[in-house]
Amino acid sequence: MADLSGRLAPHHLAAVDGVVARYAEDGACVALLLVGSLAHGHGRPESDLDVVLVATEEAFELRRSEGRLAFVIRDPTIGASLQRAARFPSERRAERERRFLCQLLAWNWYLEQAEEHANAYLTIVATHKLVLFACRVVLNANEALFPYHKWLLQETERVPRQPDGFVERISELLARPSVDAARRLKDAVLAFAGVREATLEWPNQILVDSELNWLEHEAPVDDL
């Protein structure tokens, strides 16, 4: 692991040293990666130490056969793979933006349906998805990687390019989900992206990304 002395509290550093000492002579351990809140700079004194153990191919297969796959990455070329994982796919930025905007429009429609039918569950789901894809459009424009849900809002707030009042619009929608608040957020994101809503045939893209994706790979667990 890199030098963490200036980033972690003493008790976290001691825990890191203990993990490193535990696996230093373990031939099955290729690398140790610090992940989670401490790695992202959001740690607190009581935060857990989240470490990924990168194992050899043989160790991975053994753990898989024993049902012990937690915190194991299967990749014999870990160095190159880690570099690729940390690189923003700039060549796909335009495509990603279009797909994220289509999701934004789709979930805006679902929120309208939720309000029309007084569907509390759909209101919550649609609100979450609207915020998610609004943030993903902004992160994508800044060539910032998706930090997953726990730090999505914090990391989105940090990027330099974003719509005026973006954070406030998100806070408004989360605090009081409504069609009007969703529309204000949606319109701000579309204006930021410089895309007209009429040019996005979102139903067709949603079919590909969210309905027919099982044709090419196993359906996500949410859809089982």
Image: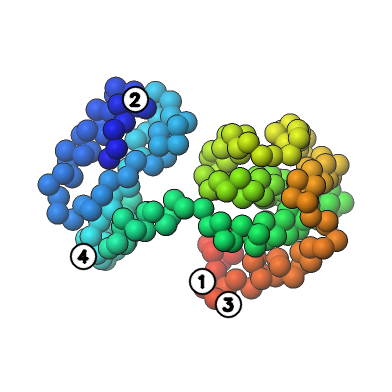
Asked if residue 191 can be seen in this view, the reply is: yes
On the image, the x and y values in percent for residue 109 come to: 81, 55
**Circle 1 residue:** 218
Secondary structure of the residue carrying tag 4 is helix
Q: Which amino acid type is shown beneath numbered disc 1?
A: Glu
> Label 2 neighbourhood size at 10 Å, few (<14), some (14-19), many (20+)?
few
Question: To which residue does mark 2 refer?
Answer: 6
Q: CA distance from mark 2 to mark 1?
A: 43 Å
In the picture, which quadrant includes the N terminus? top left
- Which badge, 1 or 4, comes first in the chain's sequence? 4
Q: Check the image and report above or below for 76 versus 4.
A: below
| Residue identified by numbered label 4 | 58
Q: Nearer the viewer, mark 3 or mark 2?
A: 2
Callout 3: helix, strand or loop? Answer: helix
Looking at the picture, tell me which residue is in the foreground, 177 or 16.
16
**2 or 4: tag closer to the N-terminus:** 2
Look at the numbered discs 2 and 4 and tell me whether their residues touch, using CB distance below 8 Å.
no
- Label 1 Cα crowd, 10 Å radius (few <14 / some 14-19 / many 20+): few
Mark 1 and mark 4: Cα distance apart in space: 25 Å
Q: Are marks 2 and 1 in contact (CB under 8 Å)?
A: no
Whole-angstrom CA distance, mark 3 to mark 2, is 48 Å
Bin the neighbour count of mark 3 within 10 Å (Cα to Cα): few under 14, some 14-19, many 20 and up. Answer: few
Please provide percent x and percent y for residue 72: 31, 54
At label 3, the amino acid type is Leu
| Mark number displayed over residue 215 | 3
